[in-house]
Image (spheres, helix red, strand yellow):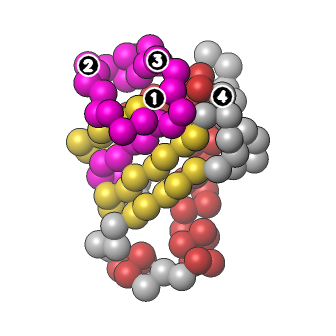
Amino acid sequence: MTYPASWEAILKAAKSVYDYYDGLEVLVDYNLIEFQSKEDILKFDESSKLTFRGMSTIIKAPIIITFYNQLDIIDVNVLMTVEEFDSADYEKFNKSLCTYLDSIELTMHRIG
């Protein structure tokens, strides 16, 4: 990521993907969190990391993304179920997901 992310920014990122995942699950640290709406995500208590996972309707593959509170790194895992990721090396993987991850990061810095 470009900048370290605050907890509030991470929550905004998780909220922003809500409509683009089938079976979205959110974990705070290693605990699966139950929630009823995307607005509930903004109420999660601060912790060291947040993970969201599920079937991305944009990438068309299961994906897991973990954000770390106050750090500028994330972990991304994509199940290689689609041809695009079947033999992806580091460069191909980054080119495939760069715009997707940039879009998520931009939502972290939006006002409101």
Depth-wise, is mark 3 or mark 2 nearer the camera?
A: 3
Region in magenta: 29-57
Q: Who's the residue at 34% across and 67% down the image?
A: 79
List the residue tagged with mark 1.
Answer: 15
Tell us which disc is closer to us: 4 or 2: 4
Residue plotted at (76% across, 41% down):
3
Q: Nearer the viewer, mark 4 or mark 1?
A: 4
Q: Quadrant of the C terminus?
A: top right
Compute the Cα span from label 4 to label 2: 23 Å
Of the numbered discs in the image, which one, if any, rests on residue 45?
A: 3
Which SS class for mark 2? Answer: loop
For badge 3, the amino acid type reads Asp
Task: Residue 26: name its quadrant.
Answer: top left
47 to the left or right of 55 = right
User: Looking at the picture, how far across and down is residue 53, in whole percent?
Assistant: 35, 47
Tag 3 and tag 2, C-beta contact below 8 Å:
no
**Three-letter amino acid code of the residue under disc 4:** Ser
Instruction: Tell us which disc is closer to us: 1 or 3.
Output: 3
Give coordinates of residue 13: x percent, y percent.
Answer: 53, 34
Distance in Å between CA atoms under marks 2 and 1: 12 Å
The amino acid on which the numbered mark 1 sits, given as a three-letter code, is Lys
Q: Is residue 33 magenta?
A: yes
Residue under circle 4?
6
Residue bearing the label numbered 2: 36
Distance in Å between CA atoms under marks 3 and 4 = 13 Å
In-image side of 76 versus 98 (left or right): left
Q: With respect to residue 89, does 63 lie above or below?
A: above
Q: In terms of depth relative to the viewer, which is nearer, 17 or 64?
A: 64
Of residues 23 and 47, the one drawn nearer to the viewer in this rendering: 47
- Counting residues from the start of the chain, the first of labels 4 and 2 encountered is 4
Q: Secondary structure at mark 1?
A: helix
